[in-house]
């Protein structure tokens, strides 16, 4: 499950990013850098493995988040799939849980 791999903090950050209220989580940027340089899991420090997995999980949902962001930016005039809307609901739920404490 995506929520378990990334954590609610990361999902809430993606919700804020989709709404234009924040940037991408640092772990996502770090995963992009790792991918760009072609680093493999065996080359990364085992102590950072959880962080690396979170980053790669975030990469896997970024396309959906970017479509959601475009949909929000165009006030619903662009196309999003049912999966994208489900993902957006999950992100908003994570954000609300963190706000409610």
Image: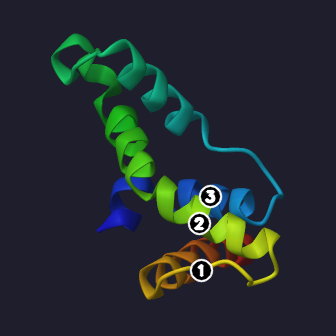
Q: Residues within 10 Å of mark 3 (few under 14, many from 20)?
A: many
**Above or below, 51 relative to 84:** above
Left/right placement of residue 67 relative to residue 31 reads: right
Residue lying furthest front in this view? 78
Of the residues tagged 1 and 2, which is closer to the observer? 1
Q: Earlier in the sequence, mark 1 or mark 2?
A: 2
Residues 23 and 66: in front is 66
Residue placed under numbered mark 2 in the picture: 67
Q: Earlier in the sequence, mark 3 or mark 1?
A: 3
Of the residues tagged 3 and 2, which is closer to the observer? 2
Residues 20 and 74: in front is 74
Q: Residues within 10 Å of mark 2 (few under 14, many from 20)?
A: some
**Above or below, 60 relative to 31:** below
Q: Position of residue 46 (x, y in %)?
A: 24, 21
Residue lying furthest bottom in this view? 82
Instruction: Examine the rendering and report whether any part of residue 19 can be seen.
Output: yes
Q: Quadrant of residue 74?
A: bottom right
The quarter in which the C terminus is drawn is bottom right
Q: Earlier in the sequence, mark 3 or mark 2?
A: 3
Q: For mark 1, give the secondary structure.
A: loop
Residue placed under numbered mark 1 in the picture: 79
Residue placed under numbered mark 3 in the picture: 14
Q: Position of residue 98 (x, y in %)?
A: 66, 69
């Amino acid at each position: 499950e995506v929520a378990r791999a990334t954590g609610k903090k990361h999902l809430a950050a993606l919700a804020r990013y989709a709404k234009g209220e924040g940037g991408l989580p640092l772990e996502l940027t770090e995963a992009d850098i790792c991918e760009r340089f072609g680093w493999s899991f065996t080359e990364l420090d085992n102590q950072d493995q959880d962080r690396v997995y979170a980053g790669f999980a975030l990469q896997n949902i970024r396309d959906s988040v970017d479509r959601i962001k475009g949909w929000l930016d165009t006030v619903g005039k662009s196309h999003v799939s049912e999966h994208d809307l489900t993902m957006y609901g999950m992100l908003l739920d994570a954000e609300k849980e963190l706000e409610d404490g």
